[in-house]
Image (cartoon, grey):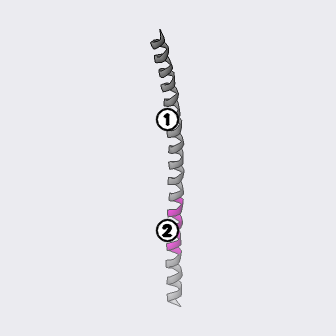
Amino acid sequence: MEFIIFGMLAAGLVLLLLSYKKERGANVETQLENFSIQLMKEIYQIKKKLKVLEDEIMINDKN
């Protein structure tokens, strides 16, 4: 009977640790997704600025 109680206690602790690890993994996944979106926005802004600069250079070369 004692083995069953200790076994259930151990199983409960293992499941508790696994649930904590899963929540932490989801948090990391969310952070990575947000970082990826932010990085894509910054790359888009840089490309827009580069396009403007290229257009200005082409205008100056024509004159």
Q: Give neighbour class at mark 1: few <14, some 14-19, many 20+ (Cα, 10 Å).
A: few
* Residue 19 occupies quadrant: bottom right
Q: Earlier in the sequence, mark 1 or mark 2?
A: 2
The label number, if any, that marks residue 8 in the structure image = none
Q: In this figure, what is the number of numbered marks? A: 2
For this rendering, which residue is in front, 3 or 14?
14
Relative to 12, say whether 31 is above or below: above
Q: Which residue is mark 2?
A: 17
> Residue 57's spot in the image, x, y percent?
46, 17
For this rendering, which residue is in front, 14 or 52?
52
The residue lying furthest to the top in this view is 63
* Residue type at the position of mark 1: Ile
Circles 1 and 2: CB atoms closer than 8 Å: no
Point 53% across, 91% down: residue? 1
* Residue type at the position of mark 2: Leu
The label number, if any, that marks residue 43 in the structure image = 1
Residue stretch rendered in magenta on the structure: 12-23
Residues at marks 1 and 2, CA–CA distance in whole angstroms? 39 Å
Q: Secondary structure at mark 1?
A: helix
> Residue 17 in magenta?
yes
Point 49% across, 39% down: residue? 39
Point 50% across, 44% down: residue? 35
Relative to 51, say whether 35 is above or below: below
Magenta stretch, overall SS = helix
> Residue 5's spot in the image, x, y percent?
53, 84
Q: Secondary structure at mark 2?
A: helix
> Residue 10 in magenta?
no
Point 51% across, 58% down: residue? 25
Relative to 44, say whether 36 is above or below: below
